């Protein structure tokens, strides 16, 4: 193909990418003039725009397409909510302390980093001696490991997320894992709750937390949402917003932060029917799956399979869960994630959040490893049940049954003639005691009464004695025409910052035959922060009216364009915009003034075409809307071979 | 006009509006199943959509139109940032305590509520006896005030925001203001800081605050933004995000909350030139102004004036401030705020935030009074200066001067032959002391040397004596070709929840001749949560494919539509959607199946038109895009007189 570009001429350099992201202000450590604060980042103009475009597509792909109900709930949350949800007791990570310096480390990260470093060192030791002996000498001397040790380490790493805190402590002892920065031993792991606390009100009497997820805001509003949906199930709510987690020692850039924007869906479904009406639309979507079984065997071998087959075989529990896994995959690929670096990993038993019954993570591979970017959990009836129990609110749904359901049950009837006379002032209490008697005991009492008096428990430690002439116990058939149930919840939960970072890595490359520091971010037009760069050839006043005119026309066509009229050379201005990922550029020169033409440059190929200004605007509009590809655009606009790039 | 509708047949009822907003889940008290928490609200589907549409228009009107740089910065902020900015010391309200119950009240609100209640009571007392004597009896007996007392109260209320805490305390004593709920006296006012505190990290060693505004995130990133703009001034950054204020006793619904979404612009400008290149575009925009002078005279009489005249007369300090006031007004009217209920009020001296040198609030009238919804402050160089001073970071801009600037200054030169010999080991210290001598002292020293030795201050309490043969002081001319300065900041800051609430009140009315509880929210198509309601006449299966078809066509046209296929009557479904503010409805009936027609209903008039399905879709698309008005639409589609509404 004439337009093919070699994007792998240079090996990926995390350092070069970081420099680009910092220099072009995609994002930067927050408060850096104050020395910064780990785990907090500010997004600059291109980062904000990229994030806004990802969110806009998310809204379209999920909320609009599926008719979900968007919510905007508060971050500040009174403590009782998270006491009920279980977060106060269980939303924690295991941390260890350096026994001498007191430095705090996350236990699972410590085990992972130390064992991985040992495996890497072993690889070096087993590799043939490097040609460049100096380079080899600079490193710490590699240490070779026995085969059985290598196997043990690999098995531990494959199921790392499955270990409890005490187990992680055991691993540290067994494998002599110390703080790599000091060489000191570490303490036994202790739990650290990840929620930020807060005091509400001027007297500080109302304890609260900053939410670590948006989910509770959906559950607490269930009644209102259910009414809004005309009391029908299923339906879904969605929220995009900030959440907070007081991470123990955040280090991996945007991948582990203390404050982040997330997008969450809570899909409320009948527990007896988790089929999805649109499942057939995604049935043939092929996903890379890493099921629980495979991992507990110590392997990370993925299985490629259409989601229809995965649900049919029971690998994925139900259609609704499967439907969302497929829709998540489609969304991620649409914004530009590399399909070869995306997998869906099922949680192992111990790893699951306390509220989940099944969970699959969409993991995206990047230079830090495989990172969870979307969690898709079946929270079952957990949340609605605990909140309903705690508050007494009705968080259930009802279904008018087409066929009434008949159920048999034991019922106690009193003999009005004798009952009141016999029990006197206890009459009410005995009646209540009979009503509260469980079915099994009623059945036993019925059998007992055939042989004489029966004792039943009353309030406190009281008991009452009943006889056959006072009470009749018999089996009755009950008819129910309405079924009441607590809906189950399927929850796809997106970490937008993580997705954004992986997209940056997947989009980054450096031009063949040039300095590896001349980077390009090949965003597609859907997510690119700026779609078109308008470049006047010089600061000559003759060009200015055309620049204004082209800007206005693009704005009217709904295209986000930017003018770069700085004094830098055209080549330098284009290079800067390659770093910003701007897919197209138009150059306004003196031919624009005299002949009414404009050139159009494509970012990846750097090829330029030329045509009348309005035709170029029409072509670039179609390119950005996705109704035209570059090869077809080249048929409409002849090649330009005048002013050369760079 | 044939399509005129009487929207004032029923008096405005706050209670009816509240019921509607609650029932249709525009918003609701957060955590209400847990008893709620004052000042925290959740937005439901229509409220979220309304807010999202207001934000989208804000982005278009400000960020896109003006080429601003969007930022997304963190809420969690280390304490030193707010220590420097002055928020730790001064971002506070005055509160008083009920001396017996300990209840906490905001001092200015207490004074306002009590005096306003006395004035209202006085009005009742002076009014002619009401026809309905029972109604009069139910109220507390009205109390008549003397004329001079009324005048005093009105004057206090007009400048309420100008009182300091101690002054508010004096007012409580002078006018015997007690807690109206208990009748108890209140304590002297004390300051209460409105920021929520937080501890960052597992050891909690990093104290922090939740930001009360997004502004600091802009200032701290100034260097990066300035680079991003190719080191040119002016430019503006913009951020939309959550902020937090721990309000003392939030009561007025969405108007005073503890967590809110705000949109802020920081426009960085040269302090020597606050003109705006696009000022002429808004020069003729007429605003309702309430200048500082008028208020300090105890009046609230507005002045209507084109912004050009206001800037020319110096009522508004500069073009950039004036430009933003006009753009704010245009934005608010565009989303549907009633122009007669919008004014721009200038802050009085004591009222200004500690960082501001001038400030105008866009205030919107609603049933709670006039509420600040947008602040537009000139923060001058305050923020950049204090952060630069504290951190040593360079937060200044430079300008290459076209003509170099020549400035005269006094310079001290040492006589190398004698100086070192004379001062010995003090040589360096004396040189440094001469360098640090201010211009005025150098001038004085020059004059003094003519008459003998002169003493100059050295380090600590030392002094040095210099003479004419050791040092020569003379006037030199200095040439500067680069000017370095700290940019000033003009800050328009929008409280989106307040704007949203005022818009709800301004849009609400009840139909003439019907129950006042049958409310309508007349949102324009730009902000309406849903643009088109699709109503199938019945649940007959014949209609379903057409419903799907029309939905898909509207979605393709970019129109947000919703289907209401519930079993309620057509009239009921339309009434429900009038409450949701949906401007148009299309009905699919058997004529749609057999003749391919569809009716189109306009919300305010309830008039229905009919036409071929695709023509109706084309018309409604143009109506929503704003390229067609209803009267013209009526020329394209004939009247429909079949199935009646209600």
Image (spheres, coloured by chain):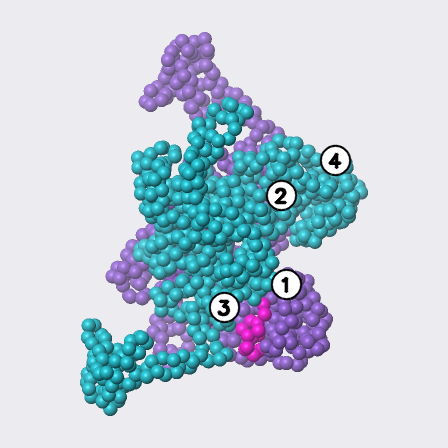
Chain colours: A purple, B cyan
Tell me the element at label 4. Answer: loop
Q: Badge 2 is on which residue?
A: B522
Judged left or right of residue A591, residue A264 is left
**Does residue A564 show up magenta in the picture?**
yes
The residue lying at 27 percent from left, 59 percent from top is A102
Could you say where residue B39 lies in the image, as x and y percent from the top left? 44, 43
Q: Given this view, does label 1 or label 4 mark the residue nearer the observer? A: 1
- Residue B182 appears at what percent x and percent y? 36, 32
Have a look at marks 3 and 2 and say if they share a chain: yes
- Percent across and percent down for residue A460 are 33, 23
Q: Chain of mark 1?
A: A
Label 1 vs label 2: CA separation? 29 Å
Label 2 near label 3: C-beta < 8 Å?
no
Disc 1: which residue: A555
Q: Provide the residue designation for mark 4.
A: B643
Q: Residue furthest right?
A: B595
Nearer-the-camera pick, B388 or A524: B388
A572 or B218, which is in the foreground?
Answer: B218
- The relative height of residue A425 versus residue B208 in the rendered view (above or below) is above
**Chain ID for label 4?**
B
Q: CA distance from mark 3 to mark 2?
A: 43 Å
First reached walking from the N terminus: tag 3 or tag 2:
3
Looking at the image, residue B616 lies above or below residue A364: above
């Amino acid at each position: 193909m004439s337009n093919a570009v070699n994007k792998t001429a240079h090996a990926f350099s995390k350092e070069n990418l970081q420099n680009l992201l910092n220099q072009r202000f995609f994002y930067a450590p927050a408060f850096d003039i104050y020395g910064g604060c780990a785990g907090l980042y500010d997004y600059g103009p291109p980062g904000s725009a990229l994030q806004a475009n990802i969110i806009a597509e998310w809204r379209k792909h999920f909320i609009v397409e599926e008719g979900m109900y968007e919510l905007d709930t508060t971050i500040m949350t009174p403590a009782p909510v998270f006491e009920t949800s279980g977060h106060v007791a269980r939303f924690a990570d295991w941390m260890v302390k350096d026994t001498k310096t007191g430095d705090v480390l996350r236990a699972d990260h410590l085990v992972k980093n130390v064992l991985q470093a040992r495996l890497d060192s072993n690889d070096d030791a087993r590799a043939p001696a490097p040609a460049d002996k100096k380079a080899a000498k600079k490193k710490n001397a590699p240490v070779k490991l026995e085969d059985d040790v290598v196997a043990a380490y690999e098995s531990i790493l494959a199921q790392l997320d499955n270990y409890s805190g005490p187990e992680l402590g055991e691993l540290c002892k067994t494998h002599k894992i110390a703080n790599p920065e000091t060489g000191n031993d570490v303490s036994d792991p202790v739990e650290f709750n990840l929620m930020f606390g807060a005091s509400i009100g001027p007297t500080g009497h109302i304890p609260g937390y900053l939410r670590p997820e948006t989910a509770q805001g959906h559950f607490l509003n269930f009644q209102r949402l259910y009414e809004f949906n005309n009391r029908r199930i299923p339906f879904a709510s969605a929220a995009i917003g900030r959440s907070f987690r007081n991470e123990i020692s955040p280090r991996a850039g945007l991948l582990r932060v203390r404050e982040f924007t997330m997008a969450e869906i809570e899909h409320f479904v009948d527990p007896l029917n988790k089929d999805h009406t649109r499942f057939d639309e995604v049935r043939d979507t092929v996903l890379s799956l890493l099921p629980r079984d495979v991992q507990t065997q110590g392997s990370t071998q993925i299985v490629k399979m259409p989601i229809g087959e995965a649900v049919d075989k029971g690998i994925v529990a139900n259609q609704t869960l499967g439907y969302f896994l497929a829709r998540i995959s489609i969304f991620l690929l649409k914004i530009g994630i590399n399909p070869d670096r995306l997998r869906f990993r099922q949680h192992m038993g111990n790893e699951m959040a306390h509220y989940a019954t099944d969970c699959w993570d969409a993991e995206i591979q990047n230079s830090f490893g495989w990172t969870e970017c979307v969690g898709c959990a079946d929270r079952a009836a957990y949340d609605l049940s605990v909140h309903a129990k705690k508050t007494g609110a009705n968080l259930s749904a009802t279904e008018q049954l087409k066929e009434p359901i008949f159920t048999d049950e034991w019922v106690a009837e009193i003999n009005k003639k004798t009952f009141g006379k016999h029990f006197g002032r206890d009459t009410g209490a005995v009646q209540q005691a009979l009503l509260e008697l469980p079915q099994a005991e009623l059945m036993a009492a019925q059998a007992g009464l055939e042989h004489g008096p029966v004792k039943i428990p009353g309030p406190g430690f009281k008991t009452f004695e009943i006889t056959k002439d006072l009470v009749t116990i018999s089996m009755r058939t009950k008819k129910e025409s309405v079924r009441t149930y607590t809906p189950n919840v399927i929850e796809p939960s997106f970490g937008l910052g993580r997705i954004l970072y992986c997209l940056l890595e997947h989009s980054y490359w450096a031009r063949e035959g040039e300095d590896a520091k001349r980077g390009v971010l090949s965003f597609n037009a859907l997510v690119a922060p700026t779609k078109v760069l308008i470049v006047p050839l010089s600061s000559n006043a003759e060009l200015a009216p055309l620049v204004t005119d082209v800007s206005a026309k693009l704005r009217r066509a709904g295209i986000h364009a930017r003018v770069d009229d700085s004094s830098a050379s055209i080549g330098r201005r284009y290079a800067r915009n390659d770093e910003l990922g701007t897919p197209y550029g138009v150059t306004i020169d003196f031919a624009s003034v005299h002949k009414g033409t404009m050139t159009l440059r494509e970012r990846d190929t750097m090829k330029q075409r030329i045509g009348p200004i309005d035709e170029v605007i029409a072509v670039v509009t179609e390119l950005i809307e996705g109704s035209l590809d570059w090869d077809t655009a080249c048929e409409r606009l002849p090649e330009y071979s005048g002013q050369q790039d760079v």
